[in-house]
Image: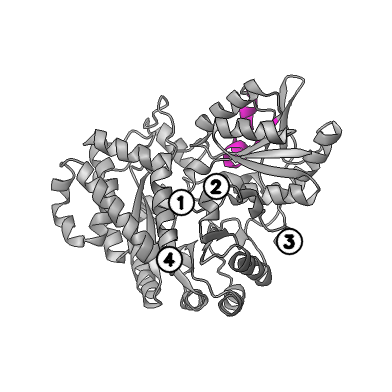
Amino acid sequence: MKILFIINVSDLGFEEPLGALYIASAAKRAGHTVEAVENDLAAIETKIARLKPDLLAISVLTPSFPYLYKLLREVKRRYDIPSIVGGPHATHFPEILKEEGIDYVFRGEGEVSFVKFLDRFERKQPMDGVENLSYIKDGRLVSNPLAPLIEDLDAVAFPDRELLSGFDQFARSDVRSVMGSRGCPYQCSYCFNNQYQGMYKDLGKKLRLRSVDNVVAECKELKERYHAKMIHFFDDIFPFKSAWVEEFAEKYSREVGLPFLTNTSFNVCSEHYLQNLAKAGCKCLLIGVETGNEYFREKILFRKMKNSMMIEKAKLIHSHGIRIYTQNLIGLPYGSLELDLETLRVNIALKADYAGAYLCQPYPGTPIERMAKEAGLFEEEKEFNRSFYYSSKIRIADRRQVERLRILFPIVVNFPVLVNFIYLFLNLPAWPWGVTGKLLHGYKIKTAILRYKMSARALTNHIRLFFRRPINRMVLKEKTEQS
C-alpha cells in the first residue's frame, strides 16, 4: 500500500523529523511504498494527484496541533483518504479522534505495531489487538494496550532519510540528527516524559541504549552517503554509562571523526564522561538550568541540582574545550521577576556560552499545568503558540518585563556588565534588543553551537532556514508590536 507522510518542515531547521523517519523505514522494510510532502495544501494536492495514497500519516506536537489539524481537515474534506496521527500530542490525547478528519491515532513507540496496523488496514481486517492503536468503534473511543518498549534498539532499521530527498532544506544541510538512546532518566514537571514514563510503567526499561557499533555505523553512513560535517545527537540525555561512553569515544573518533553536539545534564557531567565526550569530538552541550532558584528547581520543576554543583561542572566542561548552551524557564507558576533575574545571575556565574530563556509552557496533563491551575494562573482562553519560546498560558506577574527579559537574557549573560542596568533595560522598547539578540544568536550558532568547518553554502542555508521558519517570522513581528 501507499502511505503519504505529511512532514511539518516549516517549523524545522536542520533537525530531521526522526520519529517519522523511523516509522517510514519500518513501513518500507515491510514492503509498503512511502513518500513525504511538506505541510502545504498545494504541495499535498499535487502529491496526492500523482501518488494516489491509501493512507495519510502525520506526527504532531501539542503547539503545532491546531494548525496541522486545520490543514489535515481541509485535505480530508477534499480527498476521501483515511488518516492516522501520531507523535507526542496524539500519544497523550487520543481523544483527538473525536475531531473531524482523524481516523486513527497511534500512541507511543511505533515501529513494530505500526507495521501490524498497516497489514490489518491493507487486508481490511479488524483492528482489535493492534497495540498502541486508538480508533472509534461503534461510536466509542477504543484504545488498545501499549506494546512493550523495544528493548533491542539495534534491531530497529536506521531512519529512512531518502524520504526527505525532495526537501531542499535537508538536501542542503550538512548537520544530521541521530539518537543513540531512547528515554530519559528524569521526570521534569514541565515535560511529557513525566506522563510517558507512567504510561509505560512495567512495559520495559525507560532508558535504553543502542550498541556503540550500531550508532557508529549510522554516523558513518551519514558521513559517507549524505556528506554530513557535524552530528546532532538528539538524545534526551546523551548516554552516560561509563563503559558505553568510553567505547563510543574510541570508536567514534577513529571511524567517524565528525564534531557533534548533544543534550545532557549537569548531574551526569563527571570527569570521565566529559573527557570521553571531548575525545570523541563533542563541541557543545545543551544543558537545562531551568531556574536559578534551588527550591523552585526541586519543588516546582522536579529537578534536584545545587547551583554550586552546576558552577563547578560548568568549569569542568569548559576545561575540556566544550561550549555550554543553557536552557532556562521564566514566568514559572508562583514565580516573579526577581526569581527570573536570579536565573539570569546563575547563568552569568556559569559563564554560559549561550543562554536561551523560554516562557514556561503548562502543556496539558503535565504537573506544571496542574500547579498553574491550582494557583489560578492558567489562562484557558489562550491558545498555545506554535513554539514554546515566545508565549505562555500562565498568568505571569510583570508579564511585559518578563517577556522583555526573555529577549535580553542571552545578551546580558554574554555581556555581564549589562546586569547592572537590567531594570532600566526592562522598561525600554524591545525591538533593538530583539535585533541584537538575533544577531548574537546567529553568531553563537556559528561559533559555539555548530562548531565545524562550515562552507559559505551551508552558512547561507542556515540563515535562509532561520528567516523561513514561521515561528521566527512571528516572533520578529511580535517584538515590533510589543515595543
Is there any visible trace of residue 233 in the rendered image?
A: no
Q: Which comes sooner in the sequence, label 1 or label 4?
A: 1
- Asked if the stretch drawn in magenta spans residue 97, the answer is yes
Graded by Cα atoms within 10 Å as few (under 14), some (14 to 19) or many (20 or more), the crowding at tag 2 reads: some
Distance between the alpha carbons at the discs numbered 4 and 2: 38 Å
Element at label 3: loop
Circle 1: residue type: Phe
Task: Please provide the residue range marked out in magenta.
Answer: 83-98
Circle 4: residue type: Met
Q: Which comes sooner in the sequence, label 1 or label 3?
A: 3
Q: Which comes sooner in the sequence, label 4 or label 2?
A: 2
Element at label 4: loop
Q: Please provide percent x and percent y for residue 202.
A: 70, 51
Numbered badge on residue 152 = 3
Q: Are marks 2 and 1 in contact (CB under 8 Å)?
A: yes
Q: Please provide percent x and percent y for residue 455.
A: 43, 65
Residue at horizontal 58 percent and vertical 78 percent from the top: 246
Distance between the alpha carbons at the discs numbered 3 and 4: 36 Å
Q: Say left or right for 31 vs 165.
A: right
- Asked if the stretch drawn in magenta spans residue 54, the answer is no
Distance between the alpha carbons at the discs numbered 1 and 4: 39 Å
Tell me: residue 438, above or below residue 40: below
Disc count in the image?
4
Distance between the alpha carbons at the discs numbered 1 and 3: 30 Å
Distance between the alpha carbons at the discs numbered 2 and 1: 10 Å
**Residue for badge 2:** 194
Dominant SS in magenta:
helix
Circle 2: residue type: Asn
Circle 3: residue type: Asp
Numbered badge on residue 454 = 4
Q: Quadrant of residue 382?
A: top left
